[in-house]
Image: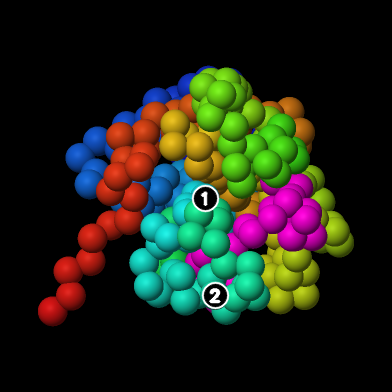
Amino acid sequence: MYNLTKFTLGDMTECGAALRKLGNGADSMEEVANRTTRYFYEHFLDPETGQNAFALVRFFKTHAYCDLDTELRRFADQMLDDSLEQPEMKCLTLLATVGDQPEWSDRSASKGHQAIPLPSEQMVAQAPMISQLISQLGLTINDVLSPDPDLLLNLQERTYNVFYIPEAKGSIHIPAQEEFIHPFEIKSVLGFGGILPSGNLIAVILFSKMSIQRDIAELFKLLALNVKMAVLPFDQQSVFRCVVRA
């Protein structure tokens, strides 16, 4: 178990090794993403209360609109003007989620984040949390929406910064203040991720009930490579878990 107030380089190394193994025996990226979110949720505790340090952990991946299933396309359509719909348009897709509320542990129960369309640089720039995530990781919006094939290898090999909001309450970059941040006592928000060979972005977002200091937040960027290695075998194939319906 890890303490967010005393997370060390040694802890990071141990955590990274565990994350890297989460792809073993998995049959889809979604399964690895679920294991990843649950790992963070279960292994970081508040030492004073013994409760989970993170109220909510989410794993996102950009995905082409045309490759989404019918339900996810329908969800994206509700957020999009039909005139802006494009088959290759990237959607920031919720691949896994786990949290304190039962509905936070089912990606299909999310009311606003199952598949967020990213139709243009201008529209992404108007989404405060997404634009800030991209910016703080050290990417441009165009790197995410339409990565240059000639620069893709460089994007894959880079070590990215963290998305870090030390004070979630009142932050212009974190929406749903009254519905989520205040009632669930979210203190800090932290995220990390990177670019896959397919050109898609993956990002893990952690909503913490404990304040996170910058020096500790910086350690999390080193975990991005471990998560990337776990999901890499499923890039461009077997992204979503197959559901057998009776």
Front-most of residues 23 and 45: 23
The answer to whether 39 appears left or right of 111 in the picture is left
Q: Where residue 167 sits in the image (x, y, percent)?
A: 81, 51
Q: Where residue 3 sits in the image (x, y, percent)?
A: 58, 39
Front-most of residues 186 and 233: 233
Q: What residue is at 85 percent from the left and 59 percent from the top?
A: 172
Amino acid type, residue under disc 1 in the picture: Thr
Front-most of residues 225 and 123: 123
Amino acid type, residue under disc 2 in the picture: Asp
Give the structural element (helix, strand or loop) at label 1.
strand
Q: What residue is at 47 percent from the left and 76 percent from the top?
A: 74
Q: Where residue 138 sits in the image (x, y, percent)?
A: 71, 32
Q: What residue is at 22 percent from the left and 47 percent from the top?
A: 27
Q: Is residue 122 magenta?
A: yes
**Within the image, what quadrant is residue 230 found in?**
top left
The answer to whether any part of residue 150 appears in the image is: yes
Instruction: Point out the frontmost of discs 2 and 1.
Output: 2
Q: Which residue is mark 2?
A: 77
The answer to whether 146 appears left or right of 186 in the picture is left
Compared to residue 2, the image places residue 76 above or below, namely: below
Q: Which residues are magenta?
A: 110-133
* Mark toward the start of the polypeptide (2 vs 1): 1
- How far is mark 2 from mark 1, CA to CA? 16 Å
Residues at circles 2 and 1 in contact by the CB criterion of under 8 Å: no
Residue 116, label in figure: none
Q: How many marks?
A: 2
Q: Identify the image's colour scheme: rainbow, by chain, secondary structure or one colour.
A: rainbow
The answer to whether any part of residue 60 appears in the image is: no
Q: Which residue is mark 1?
A: 62
Front-most of residues 241 and 46: 241
**Within the image, what quadrant is residue 137 found in?**
top right
